[in-house]
């Protein structure tokens, strides 16, 4: 059966010292709990090694990776470098990367290959912008994002991936998708995967919801049959806000 996962995405927040304090506090809180999901925190590159050293109950991921394996790419961080810190996950294709840094489905395909080749699990993000939702194009958008970046993978690689549906209009806006809207797209994503890789693979893939997920709505979202957890931005920046989401399972 597929895993339930609650993953934090710190984005560009926290100094190194603040990040260490937050990771330490989260570890201390979660080690006393019986968890019904895997807990992941995706943190800025500069935090990775230090945060890995602070946590046991929590798994660490990066927020991005380079689309090249090594060499003269000033300022970039490779999959091998991320893996060498002890991180296990990496977010690929977050809408902020697609929008502000021009990451295309083709570039993201390269990033997924490099992540997998270095033993990292991609958390691959998809989702429509508001204008696409208003034009009822959300299914076309997510199926194109998934098929262009992922559907050339062989089955044994594809089944390692975690997907995250993050409607862009819900990110950081306080405007969460309803649990019915999330379920509809998650079920559609699973059906799209089933058509390419078969239903056994589709049923084994965790699909997370992201976009203004918080203590008040996580329980209802996670209760939906195709919502296997969340990718949490703002509410992952404090233990008080993150813990009730983790405990929503
Ligand atoms: P918020 O939870 O702050 O809306 O961010 C969601 C997100 O982008 C997680 O990757």
Image (tube, rainbow, N blue to C red):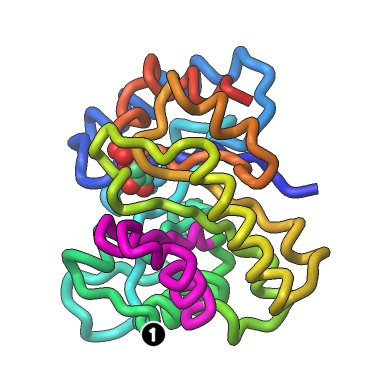
Q: Is residue 71 above or below residue 77?
A: below
Residue 6 location in percent, x, y?
53, 37
- The C terminus, quarter of image: top right
Magenta stretch holds residue 134: yes
Total tally of numbered discs in the picture? 1
Kindly identify which residue carries mark 1: 106
Image point (60%, 61%), residue name = 188
Residue 131 location in percent, x, y?
25, 61
Front one among 122 and 193: 193
Q: Is residue 50 above or below residue 123?
A: above
Front one among 14 and 169: 169
Image point (24%, 71%), residue name = 76
Q: Chief secondary structure of the magenta span?
A: helix
Residue 223 location in percent, x, y?
64, 31
Image point (28%, 74%), residue name = 103
Q: Does label 1 point to a residue whose CB lies under 8 Å from ligand 1? A: no
Local SS, label 1 = helix
Question: Residue 221 occupies which quadrant of the picture?
Answer: top right
What span is in magenta? Answer: 122-149
Q: Is residue 111 left or right of residue 59?
A: left
Front one among 5 and 46: 5
Q: Is residue 145 above or below residue 28?
A: below
Q: Is residue 106 left or right of residue 116?
A: left
Question: Residue 110 occupies which quadrant of the picture?
Answer: bottom left
Magenta stretch holds residue 192: no
- Badge 1 local density, few (<14 within 10 Å), some, or many (20+)? few
Front one among 19 and 179: 179
Residue 156 location in percent, x, y?
73, 75
Is residue 56 at least partly visible in the picture? no
């Amino acid at each position: 059966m597929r895993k339930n996962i609650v993953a934090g995405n710190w984005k560009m927040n926290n100094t190194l010292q603040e990040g260490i304090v937050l990771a330490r506090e989260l570890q201390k809180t979660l080690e006393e709990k019986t968890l019904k999901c895997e807990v992941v925190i995706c943190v800025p590159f500069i935090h990775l090694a230090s945060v890995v050293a602070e946590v046991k109950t929590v798994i660490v991921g990066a927020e991005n990776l380079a689309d090249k394996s090594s060499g003269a790419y000033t300022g970039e961080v490779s999959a091998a470098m991320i893996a060498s810190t002890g991180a296990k996950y990496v977010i690929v294709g977050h809408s902020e990367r697609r929008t502000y840094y021009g990451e295309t489905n083709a570039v993201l395909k390269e990033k997924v290959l490099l992540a997998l080749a270095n033993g990292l699990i991609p958390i691959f993000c998809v989702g429509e912008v508001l204008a696409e939702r208003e034009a009822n194009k959300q299914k076309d958008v997510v199926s194109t994002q998934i098929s262009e970046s992922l559907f050339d993978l062989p089955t044994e690689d594809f089944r390692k991936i975690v997907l995250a549906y993050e409607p862009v209009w819900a990110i950081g806006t306080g405007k969460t998708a309803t649990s019915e809207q999330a379920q509809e797209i998650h079920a559609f994503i699973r059906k799209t995967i089933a058509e390419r890789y078969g239903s056994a693979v589709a049923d084994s893939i965790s699909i997370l919801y992201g976009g203004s997920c918080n203590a008040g709505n996580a329980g209802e979202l996670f209760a939906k049959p195709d919502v296997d957890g969340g990718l949490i931005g703002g509410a992952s920046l404090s233990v008080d806000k993150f813990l009730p989401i983790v405990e929503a399972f």
